[in-house]
Image (cartoon, helix red, strand yellow):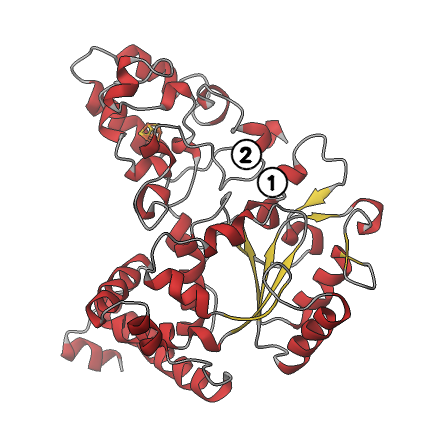
Amino acid sequence: MAKNKKSTGCSAVEQQYRDLMRRCKANLEHADRELPPARENFKETLAARGLSRRDFLKWTSLTTTALLLPPMFRPMVAKAAENFSRLPVVWLHFAECTGCSEALLRASYPNVDSILLETISLEYHETLMVCAGHQAEQCLEKAMHDFAGKFICVIEGALPTGLNGRYLTLGPKAKTGLEMAREVTAKAAATICIGSCSSFGNVQAAKPNPTDALGISDALGIKTVNIAGCPPNPANFVGTLLHFLLFGALPPLDALGRPLWAYGKRIHDFCERRPHYDAGEYVEEWGDEAAKKGWCLYKVGCKGPYTFANCSKVRYNDGISWPVMAGHGCIGCTEPAFWDSMAPLEKPVAEKTVLGEHTLDKIALGLVGVTAAGIAAHAIASAVKGQKPDYSDKK
Ligand code: SF4
């Protein structure tokens, strides 16, 4: 075999992709046999919503790249998109504001991501389903029975664990959120936490956290995929489900359970204001001349240098804008405990977190007006690139 590879000139990376391709094809065939039939024809749905084949091919190409796959995977990404409506999903709501559901459902005009989310096979979703009470409970039991081991459990909201979970009860039998989460996740193929509440607890777990709210993984002691964000980007949720449909497995995760393809880089790495950061050009206070010129928001509290997410690349509202583009610094909403440690501070937090006494802020200040500012700031940024902030003194 090794000889073969050498003689055909096939590199180790090419071989890896071929193996991945074989795995992907086998999984798509398996899905064709095992998943329930599609409720609607995806291509017809796209056409009915005014999207052409060209639009779909463009989306396929962008999504393949976003998932860090080479172009040869495009036909398979298209096939996975066609299978999207066949993947049963049970969506649970715990302590939250339903902002994540809102973010996923409200698109200003139809794009492929939003249409995929509209066709998703939601077997149970308390906010959207028509039935209520006992009838709703029957829907949940039926979904867990019919699709045992095959459905994806999506959870929106943190779990209050105080008083043995009795701060949050649901349904006609007043089950605690803890009971319901244990029951449903045990039968699911995988559990995806949508938003920072279910991922890490978020505002419910902010000090003084009277209900002892926790993220799902901490509350149940299970592995979850965390699509962090407040709210998260719909593209990250769609991409994660597509990855599951492509490979029959969830994507590689970082230490906090976030998919690496979407949360592997810092906001700061792809920010359009980054050249101003490197040049030492900062907004000093809201509304000043620098703010009008679109300079860097680091000194008025942007947490982009400590926040791992793809907002600056993918953006929100169909790619139109994102908070930093609109003029407000990143609040670090994809990081654990951001509500206590980062969001309220309209000043840099570098002093305590990233570089110790040689902080980004102090170094940047010293470099303002110096010709070498850009080069040096690049060097500093490279030194911290890939490091995650240590919040241990803030918990
Ligand atoms: S500090 Fe914020 S505004 Fe400045 S470059 Fe980084 S992410 Fe952009």
Q: Position of residue 192 (x, y in %)?
A: 55, 60
Give the residue pinned by disc 1.
202
Q: Compared to 367, does 377 lie above or below? A: below
Q: Please state which of residues 106 and 66 is positioned toward the viewer in this rendering.
A: 106
Question: What amino acid does circle 2 point to?
Answer: Phe
Does 364 sit left or right of 174 as displayed?
Answer: left
Give the residue pinned by disc 2.
338
Quadrant of the picture in which ligand 1 is shown = top left
Q: Compared to 353, does 182 lie above or below? A: below
Residue contact between numbered discs 2 and 1, judged by CB atoms under 8 Å = yes
Measure how far apart labels 2 and 1 are at the Cα level.
Answer: 7 Å
Helix, strand or loop for disc 1: helix
Question: What amino acid does circle 1 point to?
Answer: Asn
Between discs 2 and 1, the one toward the N terminus: 1
Helix, strand or loop for disc 2: helix
Answer few, some or many: residues within 10 Å of disc 2's Cα (few below 14, many 20 plus, some between 14 and 19): many
Does 23 sit left or right of 127 as displayed?
Answer: left
Position of the C terminus, as image quadrant, is: top right
For the question of whether residue 97 can be seen, the reply is yes
